[in-house]
Image: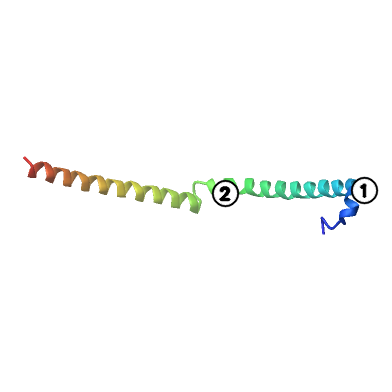
Amino acid sequence: SFNTVLNEMRADKETKADLHCRADDLRDQLYEILDESKLANEARIPVCLNPSSWLTNKLYLLTNYYVALMQVELARFEERASLMRDYYR
């Protein structure tokens, strides 16, 4: 395991140097993994933002539904406001 060092050996300079080297190696491996993941994700961005993609079509559809619902709610509000105005005149 990465951190299986006896407590007595942790004060030793060579052991400390070895642990620092292990930490540096682990950091380098993690950076490589992150870089690969970043490149893969950056390659997916144009695919997701393509105007003919499924995601874009669904976002357009969702936006249109939202606008239609807002129009229905505004029409309902106008009808009720008109009814209240007519009733209290």
What residue is disc 1 on? 12
Which element carries disc 2, helix, strand or loop?
helix
Residue labelled with disc 2: 47
Position in image of residue 30 (x %, y %): 75, 49
Q: Amino acid at mark 2?
A: Val
Q: Determine whether, in the image, residue 59 is placed left or right of residue 33.
A: left
Q: Give the Cα separation between the discs numbered 2 and 1.
A: 53 Å
Give the residue at x 90% y 54%. 8
**Horizontal relation, residue 62 to residue 39: left or right:** left
Q: Which quadrant of the rendered structure holds the N terminus? A: bottom right
Label 2 crowd bin: few (<14), some (14–19), many (20+), radius 10 Å: few
Q: Amino acid at mark 1?
A: Asp
Colour scheme shown: rainbow
**Residue beneath the point at 58% across and 46% down:** 45
- Judged from this view, the residue extending furthest toward the bottom is 1
Q: Could you say where residue 43 lies in the image, as x and y percent from the top left?
A: 63, 47
Most extreme residue toward the left is 89
The image shows residue 62 at horizontal and vertical percentages of 40, 51
Q: Are marks 2 and 1 in contact (CB under 8 Å)?
A: no
Mark 2 vs mark 1, foreground winner is 1
Q: Check the image and report above or below for 82 versus 7.
A: above
Image coordinates of residue 31 in percent, x first then y, are 75, 46
Question: Which of the marked residues, 2 or 1, is nearer the chain's N terminus?
Answer: 1
